[in-house]
Image (cartoon, rainbow, N blue to C red):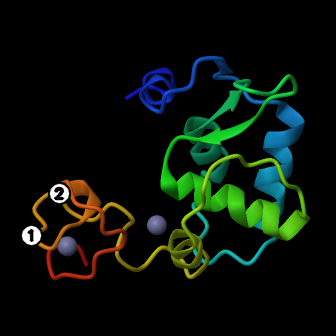
Amino acid sequence: MTKDELAKKAGLTTYDCALPQTWLNGVVDTLKHGCVSNLPENIYGVILSGVVWCYDGSLMGYPYALTNHVLGYLKIYEETTGVKELQQEVCMACVRIIKEGGFGPTHNGSKNCESGSIASGGDIAHCTCDVCF
Ligand SMILES: [Zn+2]
Ligand SMILES: [Zn+2]
């Protein structure tokens, strides 16, 4: 799905798929010098393709992450810099897994899970059953 489709699916009404360049550079620089193991080479592209700038309820706008993984990166950026602009609820298990280098059960788990992972229609984040992990 494109950023536009993901943003609409997330229920956003006013947003810009382009990101403020200074903000984007700041996030990438912070993550590169931060405490993230196995940061992807293309972290710039990961952030660029996973965030829109949302103006719902705000004149200045704020970053809105389109995936839990990217939201985790933004949370690490905020923790490191003290910036507070995220309006989304952050899954701290995702943040921990990302810091450790991305190993661990994913937030949504597997579609084939029979233990209630989010991807299979349940509400268990980071399911640790054999299918998900
Ligand atoms: Zn999570
Ligand atoms: Zn599972």
In this rendering, position of residue 63 left or right of residue 108 = right
Residue drawn where x is 28% and y is 75% of the image: 127
The residue identified by callout 2 is: 120
Does label 2 point to a residue whose CB lies under 8 Å from ligand 2? yes
SS for dot 1: loop
Q: Residues within 10 Å of mark 1 (few under 14, many from 20)?
A: some
Q: Residues within 10 Å of mark 2 (few under 14, many from 20)?
A: some
Eyeballing the image, is 61 above or below 66? above
Looking at the rendered structure, the number of numbered marks drawn on it comes to 2
Residue at mark 1 to residue at mark 2: CA–CA distance = 7 Å
Image coordinates for residue 72, horizontal then vertical, percent: 60, 61
Name the residue at 69% across, 25% down.
Answer: 56
User: Which percent across, then down, holds residue 31?
Assistant: 75, 63
Q: Is residue 66 left or right of residue 110?
A: right
Identify residue type, mark 1: Glu
**Residue 114, which numbered label?**
1
* Element assignment for label 2: helix
Residue 115's spot in the image, x, y percent? 15, 74
Q: Earlier in the sequence, mark 1 or mark 2?
A: 1
Q: What's the mark number on residue 78?
A: none
Instruction: Evaluate if marks 1 and 2 touch, with contact meaning CB atoms under 8 Å apart.
Output: yes
Q: Position of residue 4 (x, y in %)?
A: 50, 21
| Residue 66 in sight in this render | yes
Which residue is at 41% across, 28% downward? 9
Q: Quadrant of residue 13?
A: top right
Q: Quadrant of the C terminus?
A: bottom left
Front residue of 49/123: it is: 123
Task: Determine if the C-beta at disc 1 is less than 8 A from ligand 2.
Answer: yes
Kindly identify the residue that appears in the image at 54 percent across and 66 percent down.
Answer: 91
What's under tag 2, amino acid-wise? Answer: Ser
